[in-house]
Amino acid sequence: MMKMVLATLNTGKARELSAMLAGFGIEVVDQGSLGIAAVEETGKSFAENAVLKARHAAAASGLTAVADDSGLEVDALHGAPGIHSARYAGPRASDQDNLQKLLAKMQGIPEAKRGAHFRCVIAYLPTPDAKPQVFEAAWEGRILDAPRGHNGFGYDPVFYVPEQACASAELSAAVKNRLSHRGRAFALLAEYLGRQP
């Protein structure tokens, strides 16, 4: 069985990817379980950060690496918080801090102008010096006036999903994984791996 390192300290994310790649004979481990520290995300885009994280994990582990970088882009805020989604309210901000800052920024903006999308970019590196394969997907929605639901994390409670007529935080994990930006991007990676000899 091939072993692949996921450039994250989030064990839940590694489990999610493991389930998706189980049929390919790939065992996914998160970099934290290998004692690899996170690298500073100095990229100017989701793609640059994803490649940076994948290259760091591949070099430190000697394994094939995959990394994702994702965030929320709000139309009325000219694409913010974007690559700063996880630290929108500051370097040590909690999900709740970020959510409150977003809601404050969106106060008074009419529903018709509350469009937003989550974006996810995945970088796949078979070796540390290889040219990365990059996969990208987005999930369209809009920003609610107040949080709804208790599932998910981050901005899920205020991200309204029109085709489901509810907030992302009101979806089951299975439905969210099928519809979300991350689920779609990882599906593209799985499709690519399925085509490899």
Image: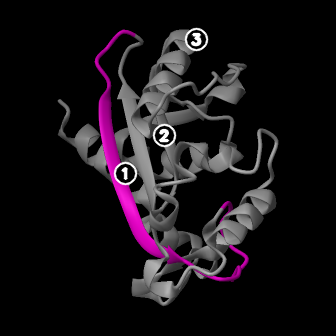
Identify residue type, mark 2: Asp
Q: Which residues are magenta?
A: 129-154
Q: Residue at x 72, y 64 (%)?
A: 99
Position of residue 135 measured from the top left corner of the image (x, y, whole percent): 31, 42
Measure the alpha-carbon separation of dots 3 and 1. Answer: 24 Å
Q: Residue at x 56, y 14 (%)?
A: 61
Q: Quadrant of the N terminus?
A: top left
Q: Secondary structure at mark 2?
A: strand
Q: Quadrant of the C terminus?
A: top left
Q: Earlier in the sequence, mark 3 or mark 2?
A: 3
Identify residue type, mark 3: Ala
- Asked if disc 1 and disc 2 are in contact, CB closer than 8 Å, the reply is yes
Nearer the observer: mark 3 or 2; the answer is 2
Q: Secondary structure at mark 1?
A: helix
Camera-nearest residue between 152 and 75:
75
Residue furthest to the front: 108
> In the image, is residue 143 part of the stretch drawn in magenta?
yes
- Residue indicated by mark 3: 60
Res 115 visible: yes
Give me the disc on residue 185: 1
- Residue indicated by mark 2: 68
Camera-nearest residue between 149 and 12:
149
Position of residue 185 measured from the top left corner of the image (x, y, whole percent): 37, 51
Identify residue type, mark 1: Ala
> In the image, is residue 137 part of the stretch drawn in magenta?
yes
Camera-nearest residue between 105 and 184:
105
